[in-house]
Image (cartoon, rainbow, N blue to C red):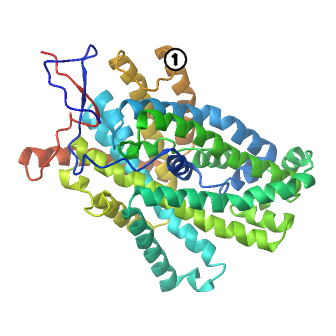
Amino acid sequence: MGLDIPPEKPTTTGILPITTTTNNPSTKKKLTLIPLIFLIYFEVAGGPYGEEPAVQAAGPLFAILGFLIFPFIWAIPESLVTAELSTTFPGNGGFVIWAHKAFGPFCGSLMGSWKFLTGVINIAAFPILCIDYLEKLFPVFNSGLPRTLAILFSTLFLSFVNYTGLNIVGMAAITLGIISLAPFVLMSLIAIPQIRPHRWVSLGQQGVKKDWTLFFNTLFWNLNFWDTVSTMAGEVENPKKTFPKALFLAVIFTCLAYIIPLMAVTGAVSVDQNEWESGFMAVAAEIISGKWLKIWIEIGAVLSAIGLFEAQLSSCAYQVLGMADLGILPKFFGVRSKWFDTPWVGILLSTLITIAVSRMDFTDIVASANFIYSLGMLLEFASFVWLRRKFPTLKRPYKVPLGIPGLVVMCLIPSAFLVLIMVIATKIVFLVSGLMTAGAIMWYFLINYLKAKKWFAFANGDEIEGVEVMQSS
């Protein structure tokens, strides 16, 4: 963050670097390159867990091709957008700032609501996933009050860990990432001598009807959320250099973590395609090497879920802080802890909503979250292109080496996939997503009413971390 530059000394771009009003502006940045890579990894993947339905839906050949090709269609464009905008506007809030600067406060608020709802719904799934794996070892967690209390206390404990600071969360992400990936590395090495390449083709040719909806949703679910780490850009050490490196390395790391175990297991294990449901990787580990490796992978799944929870809760909490800095939320939403300098109000709000959502049926709710996420991404791509046009001479520490026509093409390809995801949604998903969007719009007008009545203190929405646009005289 730079010093305030007085209006009488404008730059040639008409954009002024400014300092955000924060509770602790002198705080040293906590996230360096390696922890940031693992946080991005847990924002997106957390391991090969969850890629199995792609094989069940279309066979191993299409699954392998999907995880090879889809990163070029989706992961790389989204990462490039995130790298450019996060380094140009390096403040907490990420995509909320981008939409706000491109199209104004209404779009910033709408983006914030869409992405926040998506985030907290996803977070709620991870404690449930932990308990689902633990119940195999401790059947008491199968149902009833013990299960409810286990989900509640695991959520509260993991939220407290998040409260202790991003330095702790970042180091935990490294540890969890290494431990949860280790059994897959070992399984892949053991499986290599057993690989028979014809299985990659023959397994998908057994007359099983292909479920393209499940296939594309699985790819989308496993390879999205590259932009969510942008909400913590204000906490990154030297974000203008660190973010592009971290995103580049995280894309390679994540894609290899998916494709290597997938190719190894589908080439080494000959089973019916229908058996490739979620969790089959643990079964395959037992077939390849023994029960000890299966147990290790199941433990890794729990650790992966913990890492996913911590990374995504951090993003949601810092997004709330960034929205408070923008004036989209009252100032008290940006309050930080005196002990750990973490946005405790954002953590508390996200945790409470997560606990409430954890009691609901996830099938249509999660599908609705994907639909809303798609709406947010369409707005994000539009903001990216429009900011290039709106501020053509703005200094961009990292810049995608394309002109506006090239950027439009780059964004149209993943946008077409987003539209496909939305078109194949069910009627209930349309209904739930519509209600959530209506609520987000009502929230914007409620905030404006509260501002007009001066019932709460709000930050100046034009003064955000990154840049301030000078008003023309």
The correct choice, above or below, for 97 with respect to 262 in the image is above
**In this view of the protein, which residue sits in the foreground, 370 or 84?**
84
**In this view of the protein, which residue sits in the foreground, 188 or 145?**
188
* Residue 286 in view here: yes
The correct choice, above or below, for 68 with respect to 54 in the image is above
In the rendering, at what x and y percent does residue 405 appear?
A: 50, 14
Q: Is residue 246 left or right of residue 189?
A: left
Question: At x 75% / y 54%, what residue is drawn?
Answer: 56
Q: Residue furthest left?
A: 453
In the rendering, at what x and y percent does residue 398 appear?
A: 46, 26
Q: Which residue is mark 1?
A: 402
Question: At x 43% / y 75%, what residue is drawn?
Answer: 152
Q: Is residue 252 left or right of residue 229?
A: right
Q: Is residue 74 left or right of residue 148?
A: right
Q: Residues within 10 Å of mark 1 (few under 14, many from 20)?
A: few
Element at label 1: loop
Question: At x 48% / y 38%, what residue is drawn?
Answer: 242
The correct choice, above or below, for 245 with respect to 191 in the image is above
In the rendering, at what x and y percent does residue 47 appear?
A: 64, 55
For the N terminus, the image quarter is: top left
In the rendering, at what x and y percent does residue 89 appear?
A: 35, 33
Q: Of the residues shown, which amino acid type is indicated by label 1?
A: Leu
Question: At x 86% / y 63%, what residue is drawn?
Answer: 288
* Residue 117 in view here: no
For the C terminus, the image quarter is: top left
